[in-house]
Image (cartoon, helix red, strand yellow):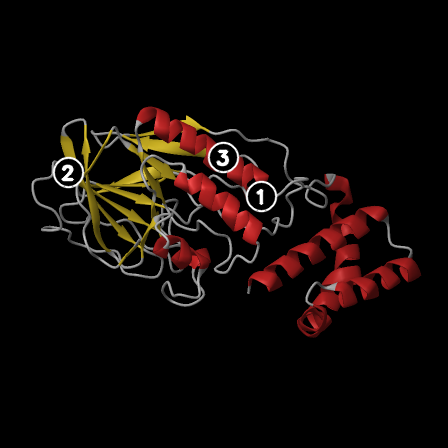
Amino acid sequence: MILFGERLDTRSCSGLLVIGDPHVGSRRPGRRKDVLWPQPVLSKLEHCVGLANARDLAVVILGDLFDRPVETDEALKNQLIRILKSFKHRPVVNVGNHDIQHMTLTDGDTLALLGLCDVVDVVATSAPVAAYDIGGRRIGVGMTPFGQTIPSDIRGSFTDVDWQAWFTHHDIAFDGGYPGAVPPFAIEACDLLVNGHIHKTQKGITAGRTRWLNPGNITRQSVDLVDHVPRAWILDAGGNLSPEALPFEADVFDLTGRLIEAAEGAVVAEAVESAFVTLLQAESPTELRRSGDGSILRDEIETRFHAEETSEVVRAIVRSLLGEAVERHARS
């Protein structure tokens, strides 16, 4: 079901299982070195099914269920659907930036199909979503998808509730301000705001009566998350969010080019500038458009490596950087 602001009936459960940004996709992130992808993501979701069903937990996914708006791998979509339909309580899914091609969810997005087929309940418009009866306490829950305005006042969203929570998918300034980030603010009648989108677990901030939390995602896609521990989180009747461990492998990133002896720094930096950066700045926009996967530019770089007898250390760094550039181009 796709929800465009209508409220659901009260749902009874023992708590909410909050799942951060799965990023399910057939394309393996650039520095991940898993042999089978996206099996690590699907395994975590399967673990969540067992956890939720065993403890009678309703399920909330914070956005970015998919890594791309249009997932073309039919086998992967079928696997994911089987997993999602295994939850006792149908998951409620916020819409993240990776789920949409345009400003809002459309029929051209894969997530819309899952909603229309009643695999999940998709929240497409910022609004109150559902009330949950958790251990005799009634909790009102609303959501704001990516790109839509977080409300400053949710009074009147629900009647006869003990407290209210809101789920978002936004750039929030948890760890200091940065351009475009929304600083946490007091939301009238909102006791708890839980955010997706920011992949690392953040320290909570309280503004007025509103406590802002960011649990972090379950899929580590980039090396800046090497120390991040993927967890699901259980929200109880008192508004407490507690972590639940998920299965994961610690050593999943190719760190080539990231770990360099300090003494080599200046030499390597100069060589990289000579062998790669100038060439990439001059030619990558054209060549990446021509080949799509960077193969034309890669051939030119390899030719230059051979001609200049470039060291293996520098070659490894440059190849890694080219892979990142191609990945960024594919996402744009």
Q: Are marks 3 and 2 in contact (CB under 8 Å)?
A: no
Q: Position of residue 278 (x, y in %)?
A: 73, 67
Residue located at (78% from left, 44% from top) = 264
Q: Can residue 245 be seen here?
A: yes
User: Does 164 sit left or right of 202 as displayed?
Assistant: left
- Label placed on residue 38: 1
Pair 3/2: label in front? 3
Mark 3 = which residue? 44
Secondary structure type for disc 3? helix
The quadrant in which residue 298 appears is bottom right
Q: Earlier in the sequence, mark 1 or mark 2?
A: 1
Q: What amino acid is at disc 2?
A: Trp
Q: Position of residue 1 (x, y in %)?
A: 31, 53
Q: Are marks 3 and 1 in contact (CB under 8 Å)?
A: no
Pair 1/2: label in front? 1
Secondary structure type for disc 2? strand
Towards the viewer: 87 or 320: 87
Residue located at (40% from left, 41% from top) = 85
Towards the viewer: 101 or 169: 101
Q: Can residue 170 be seen here?
A: no
C-alpha distance separating marks 3 and 2: 30 Å
Mark 2 = which residue? 163
Secondary structure type for disc 1? loop
Mark 3 surroundings: few (<14), some (14-19) or many (≥20) residues within 10 A: many
Q: What amino acid is at disc 1?
A: Pro
C-alpha distance separating marks 3 and 1: 10 Å
Image height of 176 relative to 104, above or below:
above
The quadrant in which residue 6 appears is bottom left
Q: Earlier in the sequence, mark 3 or mark 2?
A: 3
- Label placed on residue 222: none
User: Does 285 sit left or right of 221 as displayed?
Assistant: right
